[in-house]
Amino acid sequence: MHTIIVGDGLTKDILSPNHLFQTSKLNVGHSEIDRLMGQGKASGYGPLPSFLRQAMEAQANGARVRTVLLKTVRSSDGDIGETNPPAQSHSSEFVEPLEDIAREAVVIPASPAVIPWKELLNVFDHAAGLEVSSKPVKGELVRFLVVGCHTELRILAITSFLKNMLGCHEVAVSSHLVGSANQGAHFAALRHNLRSAGVRVFLDLTEATTYAGLDAANFQHLACRPCAINPPDVRDALSSTHRCIVEFLCMHWTRAELRPL
């Protein structure tokens, strides 16, 4: 089984907490940056950099894991239609905690408006030794996990293309590894759009790491799990389907208290 991790929206204009980049309309904001990248002394050790770092270590140790990062290149004057352009050309650089990861990963330059599918498919074919670009890929051969920003835009576009255009059986995201400047659209994409497209959405980071072929034990300390459902007797009475519904509805909470009607 091969795992290909695709990352997009990982540059400074999107994920940097520095005030120079806060004027960019693409920046996801402090709370989202803290959630993905880590907060305070833990900055740079949140779920997103920790996951990508672990993936690169697994690859270096011979695991069938490959990481492909899209690097959106913007002009120093901003892009057409952008009323608040990012600060200078540094906006095209990867955010600091991901710079070392990017040096070891396959990086594909991309324009802000167009996903470079031809280049991506060439990398996929080479990484997995499969003809991803020419025929549907069975689930037992390769899995895709897409991470980064923005959930309802590029992440949705990439996953939907892999699943519904290329016919790849195994395509997934984790709610703890994607983010957006638009919280409502982010949750709507996770709850409805991605799942409707046939993309798996993991609310438990350890499940996502297991799916990717990584050691889930390395992520237990991050406590990136679905909301806890209380009281226990009500939780235990729920079917797996009903429990899943509650977890998705309350994915932005750490705990949900249910009261039988």
Image: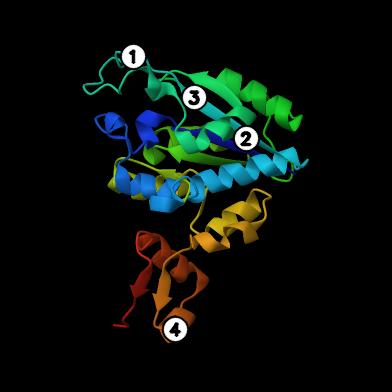
In the rendered structure, which amino acid carries the disc numbered 2? Thr
SS assignment at label 3? strand
Considering only order in the chain, which callout, 1 or 2, is on the residue closer to the N terminus? 2
Query: Of discs 2 and 1, which sits in the foreground?
Result: 1
Task: State whether residue 260 is above or below residue 169.
Answer: below
In the rendered structure, which amino acid carries the disc numbered 4? Pro
In the rendered structure, which amino acid carries the disc numbered 3? Lys
Q: CA distance from mark 2 to mark 3?
A: 13 Å
Task: State whether residue 249 is above or below residue 57.
Answer: below
**What number of labels is visible?**
4
Q: CA distance from mark 2 to mark 1?
A: 28 Å
Image mark for residue 232: 4
Task: State whether residue 58 is above or below residue 219.
Answer: above
Badge 3 is on which residue?
A: 71
Instruction: State the image coordinates of residue 56 (x, y, percent, origin top left).
Output: 65, 39
Considering only order in the chain, which callout, 1 or 3, is on the residue closer to the N terminus? 3
Instruction: State the image coordinates of residue 149 (x, y, percent, origin top left).
Output: 42, 37
Residue 142 can be seen, yes or no: no
Q: Quadrant of the N terminus?
A: top right
Considering only order in the chain, which callout, 2 or 4, is on the residue closer to the N terminus? 2
Residue farthest to the left?
83
Image mark for residue 67: 2
Badge 1 is on which residue?
A: 76
Q: CA distance from mark 1 to mark 4?
A: 55 Å
Q: CA distance from mark 3 to mark 4?
A: 45 Å
